[in-house]
Amino acid sequence: MPRDSGDTRDGTVDRRDLLRSAIAGATTVGIAGCRSLDAAGPAGTGNETGPGTEVPNDLFKGETLKIGGMWPLPDDYTIGRDAQRGAALAVKEHNQSSNGVLGADLKLLNRSTDISPAASRQNTRELCLDEEVDVLNGGFLGQSYKLMMEPIASTQTLSYFSCGASVPVVEKIASNYERHKYNFRSIGNMAQARDAELNFLETAADRMGWDRIAVFTENLEVYDAVADPLVQGIRDRGIAEVPIAKRTSQSIIDWKPLFDQAEEANCDLVCANLVLTGMTAARQWGTSERPFDFGGIHLLAMAPDFWEAVGRVSPGLWTLNMGAFDSQQTPQMSTMQDRFKQEYGYRTSAYSCFCAYDAVNNWVEAVKATGSTDPEDLIPYLKQRTWNGSILKPTLEYYDEDAQYPHDIKWSAPDIETWNELGFPPVIQWQGEKNGEARMETIAPKRAAGGEYKIKKTPWLR
């Protein structure tokens, strides 16, 4: 397939065309040594449904397949560092398996998003055009990833958005599907996180005494799918009164005026959906021991170093996380945690680690099943197969181009009962005593939390 003129690779013969020809020829002559779709593989693989093709297990012998990693500040930021390490762990597991990826080794090439749209586009272009990677993994904020999508489209490189939940990214895919069909996501989107948050609030409000909730949502594009719909959902479901609902600045350094408003309105909970100002808000809530609980889709509270970073003053804070130390959402989750600790010396709770790890395994399984690295072969397969190898969900499928969220993970948990059974995404809470040790505990839904809800009141409100 011809490439757009904006970002093209030199050479008269496309490597993907060669690979497609190789598998076509191998299938025609019936080479021995083939294996079926559900053959055992490294961590993260499982029995799948898909085309009944058998692929030669040495098809790519002597090849090196390249994965490009676009991580948010991996040298300075836990979310980026552990995403890179999660992908590297998956790469190592496949390279140490008996046959690699159909005989090929994997190589991970790392770059940083720098939390900058311009840097994201430039580094993505370098990986896709100069390094000619076979697949991309990473991204972060939606504004950056949408610019990453341009070199992805021009070079027709498959990409997994594994570190960000922005809904506008999917809207861009839907607006020009043929150009942007190369993008898949290995993390739930923010609309799905919002619905999980609503399920949690409905479950927890009565037992926690949350009759009046203030909702503060940071004024970032990623939270557009959360702000007003969350408030409307709380009211429509009869969960609680919402006397205060505000979009907050990305540069707040003093949360006292907003916390004063919540206190004066007799709010029992401040539901704060935050990224850039999250650490400041959590620290100031804890040090002032405000008379309300605190939680929400709080990005930085998902990281394992959050407790120390806020000075150990925010016990009781809760947030959503794709996985945590003790999560039981899938059997593979704890196994992956064990391997991660063996490799790096600690357990992680960074959502990006699990999603980046899943993305590598998701792509490898598709390559093994189709015998191709060409997106034109992989995309139809990804859209119609059910994957049981995910550590995030018991089964993983993608929406097709006609859905509201094309190429996002299918979400089948709009109600509490289904969410409890699915176990995804979980809610965690930092549980411990003020100024002491605290541990991230998975508190909901029931499957992930071990069969029961484990939410606790903030220590100074007990």
Image (cartoon, grey):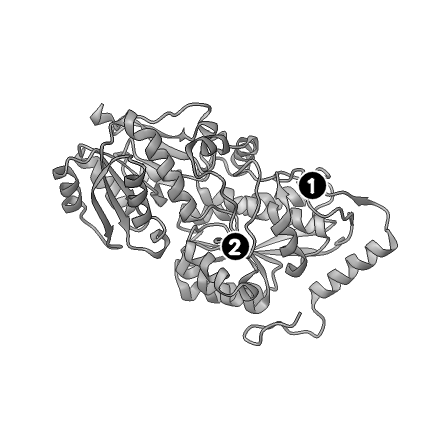
- In the shown orientation, is residue 273 left or right of residue 72? left
Front residue of 20/439: it is 20
Q: Which residue corresponds to mark 1?
A: 97
Label 2 to label 1: alpha-carbon separation: 33 Å
- In the shown orientation, is residue 131 left or right of residue 54? left
Q: Which residue corresponds to mark 2?
A: 406
Residue at 57% of width from left, 60% of height from top? 182
Quadrant of the image occupied by residue 128: bottom right
**Which residue type carries mark 2?**
Pro
- In the shown orientation, is residue 120 left or right of residue 20? left
Residue 161 seen in the figure = yes
SS class of the residue under badge 1?
Answer: loop
Residue at 47% of width from left, 55% of height from top? 139
Residue at 74% of width from left, 49% of height from top? 103
Q: Is residue 238 above or below residue 232?
A: above
Residue 397 position, x and y percent, is 57, 45
Residue 289 position, x and y percent, is 18, 33
Residue 325 seen in the figure = no
